[in-house]
Amino acid sequence: MALEDLHHNFLTGRLEDMVRWARRASVWPATFGLACCAIEMMAAGAADYDLARYGMEVFRNSPRQADLMIVAGRVSQKMAPVLRQVYDQMMEPKWVISMGVCASSGGMFNNYAIVQGVDQIVPVDVYAPGCPPSPETLMHAILTLHEKIRTGEVLQRRGGATPPAASSDGWTPEVPVAVRLGTPT
């Protein structure tokens, strides 16, 4: 039986491509809104911007139901172990978007109380720049993450490596391999 005899009644494709498509089309975010960037994140989920068209209409309250953590706002030293614990509770594959300049680099808060970049706590996949970043910037970061999932870049970063051993304070700094939005290459 040749393919011409089947009259287009089934779909063919590589299983890897189908899995990537399913993962890309069903990313469920967990909110980690810590400051003013969280308001912009909430606006992105409202009717004007409609994240439902990306399959993300419900922000999950439990990390066990989510596979995307959007860190929106500054992270204090006291919040860092909690952030790492929530990240560790998420199921693989999991992704992180650092939203705003405070989450990405500490922003204007260059002091002892603020973590100078969330990438010291969890591996970041995409950075969304701005203070605060607009909902359009967050949507661009989400689309960039979707492209990384489609091409498999995210899975190459993790590479099946075992998770790092936790330090005495509950989290280990890591150096991410990520895409920074808005910076010249």
Image (spheres, grey):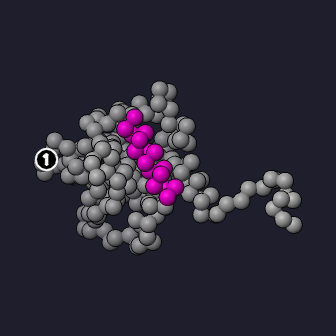
Q: Dot 1 lies on which element?
A: loop
Extreme residue toward the top, this view: 48
Q: Nearer the viewer, residue 113 or 36?
A: 36
Residue at the outermost front position: 4
**Residue 173 picture location, percent across and down:** 26, 63
Where is residue 118? Give x, y as percent. Answer: 28, 53
Is residue 46 rendered to the left or right of residue 18?
A: left
Q: Amino acid at mark 1?
A: Asn
The residue drawn where x is 44% and y is 45% is 142
Stretch of the chain drawn in magenta: 136-151
* 51 drawn magenta: no
Could you say which is closer to the camera, residue 37 or residue 165?
37
Q: Is residue 86 above or below residue 155?
A: above
- Front residue of 118/153: it is 153
User: Between residues 111 and 124, which one lies in front from this camera angle?
Assistant: 124
Quadrant into which the N terminus falls: bottom right
What secondary structure is the stretch in magenta mostly built from?
helix
Q: Number of labelled discs?
A: 1
Residue 67 in picture, x, y percent from top left = 48, 53
> What residue lies at 38% left-to-right and 55% top-to-bottom?
125
Asked if residue 3 lies left or right of residue 138, the reply is: right
From this viewpoint, is residue 62 visible?
no
Q: Residue at x 46, y 45 (%)?
A: 143
Residue 48 sits above or below residue 176 on the image: above
Q: x, y percentage for residue 30?
A: 44, 46
| Residue wearing tag 1 | 110
**Residue at image coords 41%, 73%:** 161
Question: Would you identify the image quadrant in which residue 16 lies?
Answer: bottom right
